Amino acid sequence: MTTSKKSLLVLVVVLGVCLLALIRQKPPVPSAEHSLKQTPPEAGSRSRDHGGPEPGSVDVPNAADSGPLDSDDSTAQWSLLAGLLERPHQRPKVAEVPLLTTENEARLIELYRSIPSAWNKQHIIRILAFGGCSPSAQVLLETLTREYAGVEITLGDAAVLDFVPVLSGILARRNDDALALLVQGSNPEFWVNTVMWKRDSSSSAREAAVLTGKCIQGLCVSGRPEGRKIFEFYRDHPEQTVFVHPNGEVHCFSGGVIDAAFMKAIVSEVGLEEMMDQIVYDPDILLRRFSDWRHGTAGGRSWDAWDSQARAFQRQLKERAAGRAVTGSVLKIDI
C-alpha cells in the first residue's frame, strides 16, 4: 500500500472513531451562559471568497440574551450561526456559512476561547475559517501554536487540530494572515520549534510532519500563487519532504504533498465548494475518490515514482542516524 494511501486510511479511521464516539454520546459542552462569562487569561461588510471530523454541538446565546447588536444584519446572522452551532451531528459546510460581520466574528471568538476542548468547538473552527477574517486567522494560529502546547489531548481533539490547516486554506483565499500561517507551517522547521500537544504514543516529530503536510494542503486549497510556488518546490524536490528532528527521529511528509496534489486535481474538476462540502466532508467518498485518482489517472500514478524518491532519501537518513546523531537542516523558502 502506498504511503499516501496509508495516511489517508489513517485519517478515515480517525474520522470513523470520532463519528462512532459522537453517535454513542453527545460530547459535553459548557453552557453559553458559563462560556461567555469566563474568558481565559490568554486570551462589517467584506468581500467573500470561499471540511474533517464529526462535531459536537455548542450552546450559544440568542441575540436578546447576550447583549445588543449594532445592526439588524448582525442580529439575523447570529440566529443563523446559532442554528449551525446547535447541530451535533452535522458540521457546518462552506455553502452554509456567510461572511461574518465584525461583531459576530468577535462574539464567536469569545465563545471559542471559553471552551477548553478542540473537539467541542470544531463547529466554531469551521465557521471562523469559512466566514472570518484576520481575527479568525489569529485565533487559528494561537490554537495550533499556543493553546494546547504541552497539553495531553484526546484522539478526537487531535483529529480536529490536524485538520485546522486545511480549513485555514479557505480563509487564506482572501486573507493574508491565514496565508502567512500556512506558508510558515509548510516548513517543518516551524513545527519543530513549536511546543506541540501530546497524544498517545505520537511524538512531536511525527506531529510536525503531519502538520507540515496539512499546511501544504491548505495552501493548495487557498489557490494563492504563494501556495502554488511552495507546492511546486516540493514536487520538484522530493528529498526536501524528509527532515531530521532534533530528537533524532527521521520523518517524511511526502504523503501530505500527494494529498495536496489530489486536492488540486479535485478542485480543478468540481470546484472548491463541492470538494469541501461533498468529497472531503464524507470519509467514504474521500477514500474512493482518492483511490480512483491515485490508481486510475496518469496524474495520480505519476506520484508513485516521486514518493519512491522521497522514501529512498528517508531510508538513507535513517541508516545514517542509526549509527550516529544526525542534525538535519530543514527547508527555507523565499517567497
Image (cartoon, helix red, strand yellow):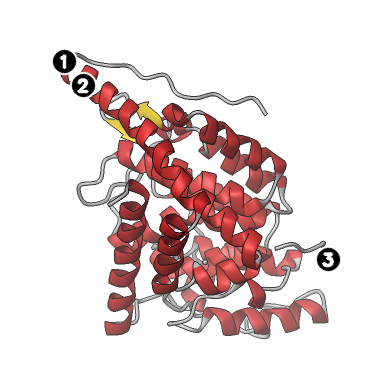
Question: Residue 319 — which label?
Answer: 2
Which corner quadrant of the image does residue 26 belong to? bottom left
Which residue lies at the image location 30% right of the left edge and 55% below the top edge? Answer: 153
Which residue lies at the image location 59% right of the left edge and 26% below the top edge? Answer: 333
Q: Amino acid at mark 2?
A: Glu
Left or right of 40, for residue 243: left
Q: Are marks 2 and 1 in contact (CB under 8 Å)?
A: yes
Q: Which residue is mark 1?
A: 323
Can residue 168 be spotted in the picture? no
Q: Amino acid at mark 3?
A: Ser
Left or right of 9, for residue 130: right
Q: Amino acid at mark 1?
A: Gly
Q: In whole angstroms, how far apart are the C-alphas of marks 3 and 1? A: 60 Å
Left or right of 205, for residue 83: right
Residue 231, given in percent of the width and then of the height, sits at 57, 39
Instruction: State the residue in front, 58 or 321.
Output: 321
Up/down of 13 relative to 61, above or below: above
Q: Which residue is mark 3?
A: 45
Can residue 210 be spotted in the picture? yes
Outermost residue toward the left? 323
Dot 2 lies on which element? helix
Q: In whole angstroms, how far apart are the C-alphas of marks 2 and 3? A: 56 Å
Mark 1 residue crowding within 10 angstroms, few (<14) / some (14–19) / many (20+): few
Residue 258, given in percent of the width and then of the height, sits at 46, 47
Closer to the camera: disc 2 or disc 3?
A: 2
Q: Quadrant of the C terminus?
A: top right
Residue 216, given in percent of the width and then of the height, sits at 53, 44
Q: In whole angstroms, how far apart are the C-alphas of marks 2 and 1? A: 7 Å
